[in-house]
Amino acid sequence: MNITSDSIAARLAAQPGMQRVPTQKACVFQQRRFVAPDLAADLVSLIERDRRPSTIADDNGDAYFRTSETCDLAADLPAVKRIEALLSEVSGIDPAYGEPLQGQRYAEGQEFKAHTDYFTPGGRDFDRYCALSGNRTWTFMIYLNDVAAGGATRFKVLDKTFQPEAGKLLCWNNRLADGGVNHATLHHGMKVRKGVKYVITKWYREREWRG
């Protein structure tokens, strides 16, 4: 990758208002009010317009494992350009290493059961998704709205749960310094109990993104 995981973590830690979870198992950060309300509203509108059922890699046969909807966000849209610039600035990661921005929508009762964002080495779909650009190294996720009830993101191994708050950034390293995957980043997008949850997600790879 173009810069090391340690240098990304150091850059994040230096950002005003950034908070790091006190654990040695993973680099996990959050920053409240990272995205302005007007930008969040624009992204919600885009997700509503183009959402489709979400899918998963290495399908385990559980039809209820991931029940959200997904939206691919075109890079030339003004709102997408704005958020991409914010993410590049805060992370210091070359945009060439990033996957296209993606949005997710969770209605009442929808969830994404405990999973990792990296692709499991040796998994059925590993070569399909990682042959060109390598595995995922970092995840940057932003909650776009407040949720009436539920919808938290729970990291079971870290014993840490994050509540959705409009504009809040949550990010973590999927890759260890030795190149291995970080099992401690197992996380659960918990069921929305009341209302709707909107998030956007940006994943970065080991090599430049080639689709």
Image (cartoon, rainbow, N blue to C red):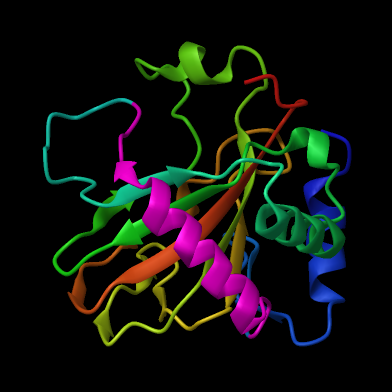
Above or below, 140 relative to 145? above
Residue 138 lies, in percent from the top left, at 65, 48
Query: Which quadrant is the N terminus positioned in?
Result: top right
As drawn, is 139 to the left or to the right of 162? right
Q: Which residues are magenta?
A: 33-57
Q: Which residue is at a point 75% across and 53% down the rendered structure image?
A: 81
Q: Looking at the image, which is closer to me, 143 or 25?
A: 143
Q: Which residue is at a point 39% across and 73% down the rendered structure image?
A: 159
Q: Looking at the image, which is closer to me, 28 or 177?
A: 28
Residue 89 lies, in percent from the top left, at 86, 61
As drawn, is 52 to the left or to the right of 20? left
Above or below, 187 relative to 163? above
Q: Looking at the image, which is closer to me, 139 or 143?
A: 143
Q: Which residue is at a point 46% across and 18% down the rendered structure image?
A: 126
Say whether residue 186 is visible: no
Above or below, 68 relative to 147? above
Q: Is residue 47 magenta?
A: yes
